[in-house]
Amino acid sequence: MRKRSVDSVIRNDASSMRVGIIAGSGSLPLALATALQVDGKDPYLLLIEGEADPAQYKDFSHEVIRITKVGRFLKALAREKCTHITLAGPVKRPNLKNLVPDMEGVKLLARITGASRKGDDGLMRAITGYLQEKGFTIIGAHELASDLLVPSGQLGKVSPTEQDDADIAAGVRIVKAVGALDIGQAAILRDAYVLAVEAAEGTDGLLTRSAAFAWDKRAGVLVKLSKPGQELKADMPTIGPETVTLAAEANLRGIALEEHKTLILDMKEAIRRADVAGIFLIGLDPESGS
């Protein structure tokens, strides 16, 4: 990832701030920890058991905690003098019937049970609200590493065609509709036909599933947006270089992402892979269609 200091707002509060990263799976928690370390900060990572790989975090202060042991989370964050918390990386929904929470976990699970009826965003709001009540400030991944945010316009060498533009426009309408229902953040359109819509499998899973329907020639686009009213501080849309590789393997023509509301992990490598594969990568404003 590009080495760039954290957001100026964060820098201004650096003297009194220590960030605790609650780490799920994927590359985002490590990217954030690295960005903070490069900037001279000392993040503390709470690795969710069964999600984050401890071997990846050997260079950072961390401990592994079971997801339902919320009391241990709070004690660890207080012990390490963390003032700000970021939630990074996806976490599979646990089977609540098989969990043995501690007392703080019981309190949070009561909220989660009610919030889960409102979908993933309601769930994230319940968690962040609970942590804020405990005195922590929730900080978004994009506030810690703003250089990961998708900029406006074309990112690589390849440009979308008129047909691609039409598919992107249709994809924006589809993703907004499914996002409003809290189903997913992405869809694949090919020649005005909805090939697939993201569900619980995530964007990379969507691309893997769609590879079975690939044409011999490159055709179709992946459109990924935030959901209406999404809690971006806890759950911002994210892709990485592997997403680009999977899009190429699905024989798509390109990827369209919401500008300033999507993260690209290792953006330089993602753009390189797009250029090598001959597919486009662009940031768009879904409200203006460009």
Image (cartoon, rainbow, N blue to C red):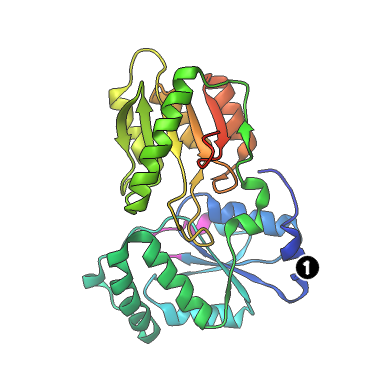
Left or right: 4, with 241 as reference point: right
Q: Is residue 273 left or right of residue 26?
A: right
Q: Amino acid at mark 1?
A: Asn
Q: Secondary structure at mark 1?
A: helix
Residue at left offset 65%, top offset 58%:
144
In the drawing, does residue 286 fall left or right of residue 108? right
Residue 6: image x %, image y %? 72, 57
**In this picture, which residue range is highlighted in magenta?**
48-55
Q: Name the quadrant of the C terminus.
A: top right
Report the residue at 73% width, 64% height from top. 9
Check residue 54 for magenta coloring.
yes
83 drawn magenta: no
Identified at 36% across, 24% down, the residue is 190
Q: Residue at x 40, y 34 (%)?
A: 171
The N terminus lies in quadrant? top right
Majority SS type along the magenta span: loop
**Circle 1 sits on which residue?**
12
Residue 253 shows in this picture: no
Going by the picture, which residue comes out furthest to the left?
Answer: 97
Residue 240, percent from left and from top: 52, 40
Q: Does 195 sit above or below residue 23?
A: above
Q: Quadrant of residue 182?
A: bottom left
Mark 1, Cα crowd under 10 Å, few <14 / some 14-19 / many 20+, is few
Outermost front residue: 288
**Hey, which quadrant is residue 44 in on the image?**
bottom right
Q: Is residue 173 left or right of residue 144?
A: left
